[in-house]
Amino acid sequence: MLTAAVKAFAALGSPPFRAVLLKSIGLAVILLVLIGIGVQRALAWAVVSGGTWLERTFGGYHGLISLSEWMLEILAGLTVIVGLVFLMPAVTALVGSFFADEIADHVERIDYPADPPGHALRLAHAVFEGVKIALLSLVVYLCAVPFLLFAGIGAVIFFFATAFLLGREYFELAAMRFHPPAEAKRLRKQHGSAVLVAGMVIAAFVSVPILNLATPLFATAFMVHMHKRLSESPRRELIEPRRTGVKRV
């Protein structure tokens, strides 16, 4: 598993990975800007409408209401900026998942040239998985806020929850290139312990600011290696007894 993690991390510096990372971050920034503009316009409209309603309802107090509107507009702008920074990893996960097959294909061609290549997911399925991973990432980060108020056990619970959720999603994403969704889930459950430990590696990666923008690339490449190793382990168990002359019971 350590070898798989090292290979996935080392691949982040390769030209194909850098190209995908730049594309995913670029598209994520564009999406975030559009979201930010929309939210800022909505909040500004709400502030102005609220101020107008207050003046009509209570009359007078124009100066106080105008000052309140000005302060609320500044607060709304700061809230949008903080919210966009907070959403960046989730939006990057959404956009990056659309390039998951490109990353997986590159890993398979470079590290497993003798194996049959996987098949890209259908567009509708890829979009569904991308949205699911993005929502999952968003939920994980939102859940992190209350855990910041607790020391020790809260952080541990959050870490393992992140490991479990992201590990299962990225493993199934890699497995579905070779298996139907039901079989990918069965394989994930069969190797639940290994997938959880692999998820802990991803959770550790996610916890590093800035670096976590590359989470979709690292997690996809890492789980491609893990799927290969876990898929080959039953075959090795069948081959090794034949080589040693031991009969399986």
Image (cartoon, rainbow, N blue to C red):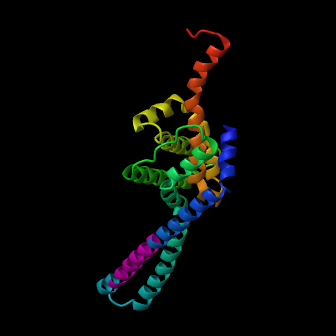
Quadrant in which the N terminus appears: top right
Taken as a whole, is the magenta stretch helix, strand or loop?
Answer: helix
Name which residue lies at 62% across and 14% down: 242
Q: Residue furthest left?
A: 57
- Residue 117, x across and y down, in percent: 52, 42
| Magenta span includes 22 | no
Residue closer to the observer: 85 or 214:
214
> Residue 156 sits in which quadrant?
top right
Up/down of 98 relative to 82, above or below: above
Quadrant in which the C terminus appears: top right
Residue 159 visible somewhere in the drawing: no
- Residue 47, x across and y down, in percent: 40, 79
Q: Which residues are magenta?
A: 35-52
- Residue 42, x across and y down, in percent: 39, 75
Residue closer to the observer: 169 or 59:
169
Is 246 situated left or right of 166 in this image?
right
- Residue 121, x across and y down, in percent: 43, 47
Up/down of 136 relative to 230, above or below: below
| Magenta span includes 39 | yes
Is 101 situated left or right of 48 in this image?
right
In this rendering, the count of numbered labels is 0
Up/down of 56 relative to 116, above or below: below
Name which residue lies at 54% across and 53% down: 146
Q: Residue furthest front?
A: 114
Residue 206 visible somewhere in the drawing: yes
Residue closer to the observer: 36 or 189:
189
Name which residue lies at 58% across and 53% down: 217
Up/down of 128 relative to 71, above or below: above
